[in-house]
Amino acid sequence: MNRILLIILGVVSAVLVVVLFIAYLLIMRPYNVMVEKDETVSSQWSFVESSYQRRADLIPNLVNTVKGYAEHEKSTLEEVVAARASATSVKIDAKNLTPEAIANFQKAQEGLSSSLSKLLVVVEKYPDLKANQNFLELQSQLEGTENRINTERNKFNVAVMDFNTYIRKFPNNVTAGMFGFSKRGYFEAAAGSEKAPEVKF
Amino acid sequence: MKINHKTVLILLCCLFSTMLFAADFPERSSTLVTDYTNTLDAGSLQTLEQQLVAFNDSTSTQIAIVIMASTGGYEIKDYAAQLGEKWGIGQKGKNNGVILLIAKDDHKMAIQVGYGLEPLLTDALSKRIIEQVLKPAFREDRYFEGLQSAAQVIMSVCAGEFTADQYIKKTREQKPKDASMLLLLLVFVIVFWVMKRKVSRYARGNNIPFWTALLLMNAASNRSRGSYSNFSSGSGGFDSGGSSFGGFGGGSFGGGGASGSW
């Protein structure tokens, strides 16, 4: 009698271990991993945002420097200032990184990128400006900042891809639905950048 | 119950290897100066390497010089930042790495700076090093002189910001990840199912409780197998007179720096 009780107890605890294990596998672990990956996406987003902010912060200085040498380019300069204002007005909450929000943000920033590159083309006409030390510094900072934007965007996309792939897999999709995790948005690559160039070591 | 450490290790390695990038990057170098083009002769290579290793040993700041043929169509500064990130130049957490990448056939160079050094080695300063130190030297094919003086400037700028303590207590003890816990549980369950019948027969035969029987049988099998499982994962850490480079520390890059061409 006692032995049967012990066997039952053994089987029950074995079943309990298996049930706990399955719960861990299906719910607890996916949930925790999702939280982690989501945090990575959010923190990477803050890097993206601050690199764009850094660019916006450079612009007043750049505009002032150019103004001193290229009085005739008023319309181009005004365009840059206006594009900066509209780009900085688009802000996204890190909790709301939906594909639509990202696309909006990207569109606003691209307006600034294109008016900035227009300005840099115009500047070519002014050799005095191009020799100005202050302008050269600003130009190298701008280049560095564009590269930061690029780098942080790539890292952000990698984090988003990791998150999106994870929540779409079975059984994670069920857990994701249960806790309201939804797909995050990507930055679209610039046209023509999808080809893989060949690297030589 | 025994878990073969080797299997766990192999499984963990498989898990981590899937996390690597698939793009075109050379294997992580084991030296700070890496020349894929044989531009530098052995003596120059050695001199540069020793200076940079000494700097790494005293400040934990890692300055890597990489000379390759071409980055293809990739923007060199972007490629350099990604390579720095991938190799993990600089220490984890401090992100105090610098990569100086030369694409010889493209006649292009880039300096990329880890997050931690961005306030010191600014974009404008990086640009100035490229324009005033590297470019004139490279135009006259004086690669070693150019690289050495650039390295000197970078070292003098970055000196003092970080000390070696970070380097010394480098990731020696790695915490077992979540996955190993899972594996442990999995192995436990499997072993449990396999042994259940045997153990319960043993338990009934000797009139002892199931769990006691399980433990007893385990102890017995442990003894018969001896100390085979005393396997420790060799991390390959050794000191050879302080002149060898201990490996990259996992630093991260955000795209700060500059690039240029000659």
Image: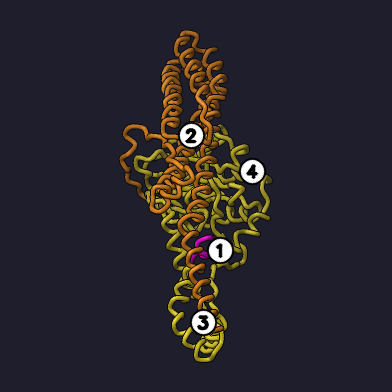
**Sequence-wise first label, 2 or 3:** 3
Q: Chain of mark 1?
A: B
Residues flagged by tags 1 and 2 on a common chain: no
Residues flagged by tags 2 and 4 on a common chain: no
Disc 1 vs disc 2: Cβ atoms closer than 8 Å?
A: no
Mark 2 or mark 4: which is in front? 2
Q: Pinpoint residue B203: horizontal percent, then vertical percent.
A: 51, 86
* Part of the protein shown in magenta: B175-184
Q: Dot 2, crowdedness within 10 Å: few (<14), some or many (≥20)? A: many
Mark 1 or mark 3: which is in front? 3
Q: Dot 1, crowdedness within 10 Å: few (<14), some or many (≥20)? A: few
Query: The chain drawn yellow is chain what?
Result: B
Check residue A4 in the rendering and tell me which mark sits there, or answer none.
Answer: 3
Residue at image coords 58%, 62%? B175
Q: Could you say whether the residue bearing mark 3 is in a helix, strand or loop?
A: helix
| Disc 3 to disc 4, C-alpha distance | 78 Å
Q: Amino acid at mark 2?
A: Ile
User: On the image, numbered disc 4 is attached to which residue?
Assistant: B156
How many numbered markers are drawn? 4
Q: Closer to the camera, B28 or B204?
A: B204
Residues flagged by tags 1 and 3 on a common chain: no
Q: Pinpoint residue B29: horizontal percent, then vertical percent.
A: 47, 56
Magenta stretch holds residue B180:
yes
Query: The chain drawn orange is chain what?
Result: A
Check residue A149 in the rendering and tell me which mark sits there, or answer none.
Answer: 2
- Left-right relation of B151 to B109: right
Q: Chain of mark 3?
A: A
Q: Is residue B222 above or below residue B103?
A: below
Q: Could you say whether the residue bearing mark 4 is in a helix, strand or loop?
A: helix
| Disc 2 to disc 4, C-alpha distance | 28 Å
Residue at image coords 45%, 50%? A175
User: On the image, numbered disc 1 is attached to which residue?
Assistant: B176
